[in-house]
Image: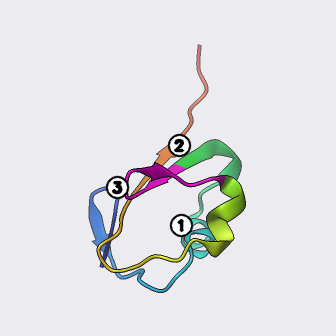
Amino acid sequence: MVKVNGTDLDLAGKTLAAYLEASGYDPKRIAVECNGEIVPKAQYGETVFRDGDTVEVVSFVGGG
């Protein structure tokens, strides 16, 4: 299981890019941290989740 924003999901073996696309995230408007490290956008397609990973996806919201 992979913990994403506090929720356990069965994502082991899947890529970060596949998860983001399936979840409807716009990669241009988010930042992702995996196990305490920021994941560069260029590595989303090659970042494969493993059991026990902890992921935080943060969306940027405009305002003013």
- Mark 1 and mark 3 lie on one chain; the one further toward the N terminus is 3
Q: Quadrant of the C terminus?
A: top right
Identify the element where label 1 is drawn.
helix
* Residue annotated with mark 1: 23
Magenta region: which residues?
Answer: 32-40
Q: Nearer the viewer, residue 27 or 13?
A: 13
Query: Where is residue 28 shown, x and y percent of the image?
Result: 70, 47
The residue at the point 53 percent across, 67 percent down is 23
Identify the element where label 2 is drawn.
strand
Q: Residue furthest bottom?
A: 13
Using the image, tell me which numbered label, if any, was put on residue 59. 2
Query: Where is residue 1 shown, x and y percent of the image?
Result: 30, 79
| Residues at marks 1 and 3 touching, judged by CB atoms closer than 8 Å | no
54 sits to left or right of 18:
left
| Residues at marks 1 and 2 touching, judged by CB atoms closer than 8 Å | no
Above or below residue 39? Residue 17 is below
Magenta stretch: includes residue 31: no
Between the residue at mark 1 and the residue at mark 2, the CA separation in whole angstroms equals: 13 Å
- Mark 1 and mark 2 lie on one chain; the one further toward the N terminus is 1
Q: Residue furthest top?
A: 64
* Residue annotated with mark 3: 5
Query: Where is residue 31 shown, x and y percent of the image?
Result: 56, 46
Q: Amino acid at mark 3?
A: Asn
